[in-house]
Amino acid sequence: MRVFVAGATGAMGRQLVPRLVRAGHEVHAMTRSESKQGFLRELGAVPVVADALDPDQVARAVATARPDVVVHQLTSIGPMDMRHFDRAFAQTNRLRTEGTDHLLSAAQAVGVERFVAQSFFAGYDRVGGPVKSEDDPFGTQPPPGMEQTVGAIRHVEDTVLAATWTHGLVLRYGGFYGPHTSLGPDGEQTDAVRQRKFPIVGDGGGVWSFIHIADAAEATVAAVECGAPGVYNVVDDEPARVSTWLTVLAESLGAKAPMRVPRFVGKLFAGETGAVMMTQLRGASNAKAKRELGWTPAHATWRDGFRELAVSARAETDAAA
């Protein structure tokens, strides 16, 4: 099939594009930067230069490629600021609202058969049990400070699923870790854990779901090729409390155990958003994705992935010494 990937040079795109090429697809990879065309050619793709926020450029790019499938992986995430979460995600929120609308409009004009879009597990309402399925309420009770971000995610989901002219699939990814992510060998979150700047807030009872970036890419290839329209949680097999996974991560990295701070102290440096994510977040089940996409994560649990991450981090440190 001919597959158009928007957001082809991000952490996901770097993993996804070569996998699609190896699977025999003709990949048209969109980037905003002229200078990244060579990199995309090296991955085996046809580079496409367009600004995702310019509807005319997007329309021309998609019309030229005439894809069977569009994959929407547009993000622009800078340094994390939990106190001002929506501000930190402002550009990504535009890509998830305006960018989604531009891609859908362009895709409809050329009769795209399948549209696969990125979402995020952290929007599940913080009620009931600790692990959620795709049938549970999502995005109706966003954490304070994340209203715009969760609203943008809901926009992606609602508009893609409402597009009756195509097969729309939404992938609610877990927290990414691995190469080129903030929880990679030299990532922002990894450094914070090493430096004991990532404390356990309150009881650390928030439940997080993770997914290695390579496993997320494999699931996305599966969604390109199969699966009914709908929402899929793309996460590993072990949702975990913050107090559990953060302690294991620090130990894997050879760092001191994370500090523990009361919730009111956590709010001072991470805001209400950070405090809620550390104490109230709900995880997600991958049962539907495994069943209907025929996908299984190679890193079944973040425990294995974090050990692998620690080995890579030590190798990079040794190489830089």
Image (cartoon, rainbow, N blue to C red):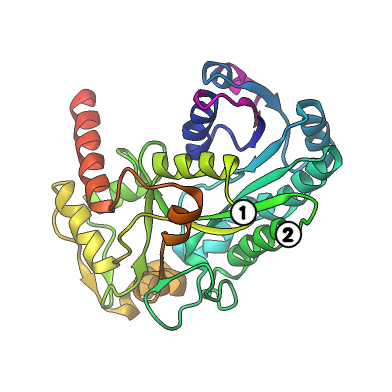
Identity, as a three-letter code, of the amino acid under mark 1: Ala
Q: Which residues are magenta?
A: 22-38
Image quadrant holding the N terminus, namely top right
Q: Is residue 159 left or right of residue 185?
A: right
From the viewer's perspective, is residue 286 above or below residue 176? Answer: below
Q: Which residue is mark 1?
A: 228
Would you say residue 83 sits in the magenta stretch?
Answer: no
What residue is pinned by disc 2?
Answer: 159
Q: Nearer the viewer, residue 12 or 293?
A: 293
The C terminus, quarter of image: top left
Q: Provide residue 265's location: percent of width, then percent of height.
A: 31, 76
Asked if residue 90 is positioned above or below residue 73 in the image, the reply reads: below
Residue at 71% x, 27% y: name it.
49
Q: CA distance from mark 1 to mark 2?
A: 16 Å
Q: Quadrant of residue 150?
A: bottom right
How many discs mark residues in the rendered view? 2
